[in-house]
Amino acid sequence: MGMLVIWSAYGHQIFQNRVNSISNDVRNYTLNLFNHYLIRRIISDESVLLSRELLHEYGSKDTLNFKYACLLYLENLFVYSILQNEEHKGVDSSGVLGSSNARRLWVDADNDPVIIFTHKKAGQILVRQLGLGVSGRYKTPMMEIGYFDKHYHYTSPRAISLWQEAEQFIANQSKLKKLAKNLIEHFKEDLFSQRSPSPSISFSDVPDVLRKDFASAFSSPGAVGNYAREYWISVTGLDDGASKALLQVLDNNAKLDKPKELDPQNLIESALKQTLSDEERLKMTQIASLEPFLSDIMLMFTLLTAKKSRPLSEVITQWQEFGRTEHTLPQRANLLRSDVALNNVINGNTAGRRMKNLLQLADTATLDDQVTLLLEYHNNLMLKRSQMPWLTLDNAGRQVKVHVRPLQVPDTEDWPPGEWYYSYYLPQFKSLVRGFQGVVEG
């Protein structure tokens, strides 16, 4: 239904693009920070010299491709270190990006894969690793914070300040400090001294202490959260405003003898009981106002696509069984259409245009009209994607024909009026906070 661009805008309001569907793990956040810290060290340290072949390949240590090669090498060394040490207490490979591919390569190489220092395909465990690995998935939120720009330049005034804080943070963590020192020596002695544009090394030839220390420093999200919580909460701004209220709710809940299972609706409603400025409170009340409308649209779409073919009258009857009427969508749409502040969040972009079309439900009088409008919205959306619509109306608009696998309809008690469907990145925030709390994901 193309709702992602709508609800995500309201989630990003709260989390300032620090949390999304792919960047919500404190271990990966910290690993990416550490890897870029090392690259900065390698660039600035005049004692770290490149071979003639590497200089010919990359030009200098400050080129984008050289930074790519460093990131890939560090990510690969990390994942293999985790796999080698995962039987040790506290080492958890779940959530490690690329671990499935790495495990296959590990087995194929008799537990001794070769790691290549290159920005090219030969250096990638994951397909398109520069986009789908740790550095790619965590690039946008770390750019938003200000650590670097899209070309991995670390020299803006904001970046310089942030890296001063990061250097202090790493210096205060004995495991990270030791690991960084040994990795710099590893690059100098074992890689950059090779007379090759793509130096390589068998994993077994990497110093044993380095492999163990890499796995120990980043053993699990919970272990990393134990030492990185205060740093990340501070630099991400998650200790302020609406996100702080949500964090307090999760922290308080974690302290209970029997913590509650907080879904997005529970979490927002509980956070609204915290002390907040009007501006920050508005970010959450907008979600609370918007979501029942989007959820009901998704319910209608689910009912429409529940069978390959069914009379429209059957869909309408089922809609009523879920406690909705012909007034449900128009009333919700009318309230939202009059909310200027809510609509200003997405005004003028794709999300705003889609929302405007959906709010035309305020002008419909019958369920037939509402279904017709939603199908027109869906058809236009699929047309822009150059795809066929999932469903159409036949027999003068009386028969619903579904052209994809039907969606499963939940029980009526699982989708009561006012029930939420979309998440606004709240589950991802919960995952990040579980790491902050030092909780090892099970």
Image (tube, rainbow, N blue to C red):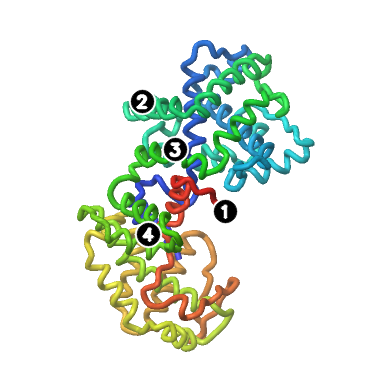
Q: Where does label 2 land, which residue?
A: 160
Q: Where does label 3 land, which residue?
A: 228
Q: Where does label 1 land, which residue?
A: 442
* Residue type, mark 2 in image: Ile
CA distance separating discs 4 and 1: 32 Å
Q: Residue at x 26, y 73 (%)?
A: 334
The quadrant in which the N terminus is found is bottom left
Pick the front one: 271 or 420: 271
Closer to the chain start, of discs 3 and 1, is 3
Closer to the chain start, of discs 3 and 4, is 4
Res. 353 mark: none
Secondary structure state at the residue bearing disc 4: helix
Q: Where does label 4 land, which residue?
A: 6
Pick the front one: 278 or 353: 278
Closer to the chain start, of discs 4 and 1, is 4
* Residue type, mark 3 in image: Ala
Closer to the chain start, of discs 2 and 4, is 4
CA distance separating discs 1 and 2: 37 Å
